[in-house]
Image (spheres, rainbow, N blue to C red):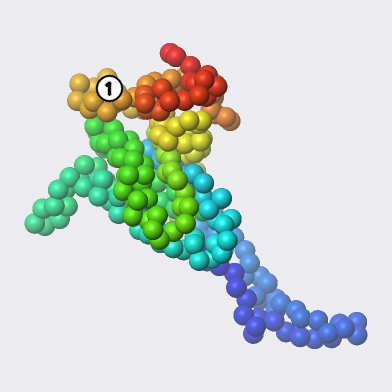
Amino acid sequence: MPTYKPRSSDYVRTEIDGQRRKLLKHESFEQFNASMLGLGDLSLESKSTDAIAAVFDLEGFTQFCNQIDPHLSVPSFLHPFLSWLMNELRNEMKQKDEAEGVALWCPLPFFTKFLGDGLPVLWGCRGLSQAAMRNVVASSYSICKKYHHEFLPNLKSKVAEPPHRLRVGLARGTVYSVGEGNDYVGSCINMAARLQKLPGITFAFNRRGFDLDDERTTPFFTDYLLTREVTVRGIGEGELVCILRNEYEKMKSADKKTYREV
């Protein structure tokens, strides 16, 4: 993304009303505009895409950034974390290596973006089978599990008190391009962001758009998940959401009231 960093040559010193002033040149002043957002031509018509949106969120990242000397700790965490996450997103989609390329369970995400404490990730659903869509969901859960069991243990000797959990929320819906497709908006992104913040969970996905009654559905969906009705802030009061059975059973009584039986 472009950044706005005027150089010393972009300023001029002059005298105004008997006082010496440092002024930003007009051409440099005008460079602070919508192009700074890196979205390209914002007047272009938006294009819609059927997609699965996942929002991966680092629980405790704000507190981590507030520790002593964050300018040393934060890069030491983010560099390995972002490299690891992108590698996991890639490898979870891989079925096997062939002589001429890589066979995929489903296409790689077409969009991802770092937002400070997490990442929205988008997969296109056009031409995707329900089995492939379920693979996206299961793979996202696998990544969260690996963060706790594989990534954190290898990092704790290098970084003090790193974010202790990686949460993910997923939802299927329509996303709309902004500008030249350098960003996207859509209710499913909002849904995914809110689901990962539900109390007591690290993993949740909206039931809408996923066929869990397919005979090819894996035991992960049939044995390890519960479907519950929840109120999702700003979206709806009766959303059907799938959560992990073992996380629900460990919840406090107050948190369990969020998840109503259907």
Secondary structure of residue under mark 1: helix
Q: Quadrant of the C terminus?
A: top left
Front position in the image: 26 or 37: 37
Q: Is residue 126 above or below residue 80?
A: above
**178 relative position to 14: left or right:** left
In percent of width and height, residue 246 lies at 37, 26
Looking at the image, which residue is at 37% across and 56% down? 155
Looking at the image, which residue is at 43% across and 20% down? 228
Looking at the image, which residue is at 41% across and 22% down? 249
Which quarter of the picture shows residue 27?
A: bottom right
Q: Is residue 177 visible?
A: no
Front position in the image: 256 or 111: 256
Looking at the image, which residue is at 36% across and 46% down? 147
Q: Is residue 257 above or below residue 47?
A: above
Q: Is residue 251 above or below residue 84?
A: above
Name the residue furthest top: 262
**32 relative position to 193: left or right:** right
Which quarter of the picture shows residue 128?
A: top left
Q: Is residue 146 above or below residue 26?
A: above
Tag 1: amino acid: Thr
The residue at which mark 1 appears reads as 222
Name the residue furthest front: 157
In percent of width and height, residue 64 lies at 53, 53
